[in-house]
Image (cartoon, coloured by chain):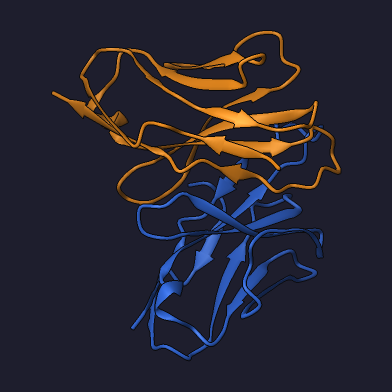
């Protein structure tokens, strides 16, 4: 069965520093997708970044990058130059398969609450 | 604005009652997902529909049911409500891989259910 583990329930980081949020996953599927979402205190879920299991390069989106280490089954989110507005809950998620007809039990980790300190 | 619309945003009801949560996916998205987020918890996958048919099922209680209609909107029905059903219920839709997206989910703002 697929599983997502986020071991950091909470983190405090000084503004402008880089921060790494950990995510490890477990799957027997050779093909899968990994996602990160941000949930501010207002509650909405915001898609940040995606990494496919066959992608050769780490995904980047602005200040967000995904440190994908396939052999270690980790997909850590790196936020560069953190800002106060980055304070939120962050969820790592995995979708099994990468085909159009995949069985989409997209599963989420329990999240990491990030606090950016001024 | 993700383009996914959920109603109602807030709902307060009593134990034993039944409620219906409604979701309209983004224009063009055929897949609809329902997730439950209890206090300080991650998102628990409930069920997924694709173009009107159930595609995947998570740990959805028998008291809960869902469907997707021909116009692609979806409803999640929660019956015989218990205190523990109080949660934020999210609907999400997605673009299929190969249709211009990576299959990422676009979430509605959620329906916050409080059972008293």
Q: Nearer the viewer, residue B116 or B20?
A: B116
Shade representing chain B:
blue
The residue at 72%/50% (across/down) is B29
Q: Residue A3, position in %: x, y?
A: 61, 39
Q: Residue A82, position in %: x, y?
A: 29, 19
Q: Quadrant of the C terminus of chain B?
A: bottom left
The residue at 26%/12% (across/down) is A17
Q: Residue A12, position in %: x, y?
A: 23, 27
Q: Is residue A110 above or below residue A99?
A: below
Query: Toward which corner of the image does residue A39 lie, by quadrant?
Result: top left
The residue at 72%/42% (across/down) is B95
Residue B104 visible in the shown view: no
Chain corresponding to orange in the figure: A
Query: Toward which corner of the image does residue A81 lie, by quadrant?
Result: top left
Q: Nearer the viewer, residue A43 or B44?
A: B44
Q: Residue B31, position in %: x, y?
A: 73, 53
Residue A65 visible in the shown view: yes
């Amino acid at each position: 069965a697929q599983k997502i583990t986020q071991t950091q329930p909470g983190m405090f980081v000084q503004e402008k520093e880089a921060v790494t949020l950990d995510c490890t996953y477990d799957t027997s599927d050779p093909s899968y997708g990994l996602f990160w979402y941000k949930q501010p205190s207002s509650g909405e879920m915001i898609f940040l970044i995606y990494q496919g299991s066959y992608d050769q390069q780490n995904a980047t989106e602005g200040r967000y990058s995904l440190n994908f280490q396939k052999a270690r089954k980790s997909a850590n989110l790196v936020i560069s130059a953190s800002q106060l507005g980055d304070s939120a809950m962050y969820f790592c998620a995995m979708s099994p398969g990468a085909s159009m007809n995949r069985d989409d039990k997209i599963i989420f980790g329990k999240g990491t609450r990030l606090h950016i300190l001024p | 604005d993700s383009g996914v619309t959920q109603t109602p945003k807030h709902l307060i009801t009593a134990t034993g009652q039944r409620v219906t949560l409604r979701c309209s996916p983004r224009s063009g998205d055929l897949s609809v997902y329902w997730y439950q987020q209890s206090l300080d918890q991650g998102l628990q996958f409930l069920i997924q529909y694709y173009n009107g048919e159930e595609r995947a099922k998570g740990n959805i209680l028998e008291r809960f049911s869902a469907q997707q209609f021909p116009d692609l909107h979806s409803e999640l029905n929660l019956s015989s409500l218990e205190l523990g059903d109080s949660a934020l219920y999210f609907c999400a839709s997605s673009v299929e891989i190969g249709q211009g997206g990576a299959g990422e989910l676009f979430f509605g703002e959620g329906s916050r259910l409080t059972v008293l």
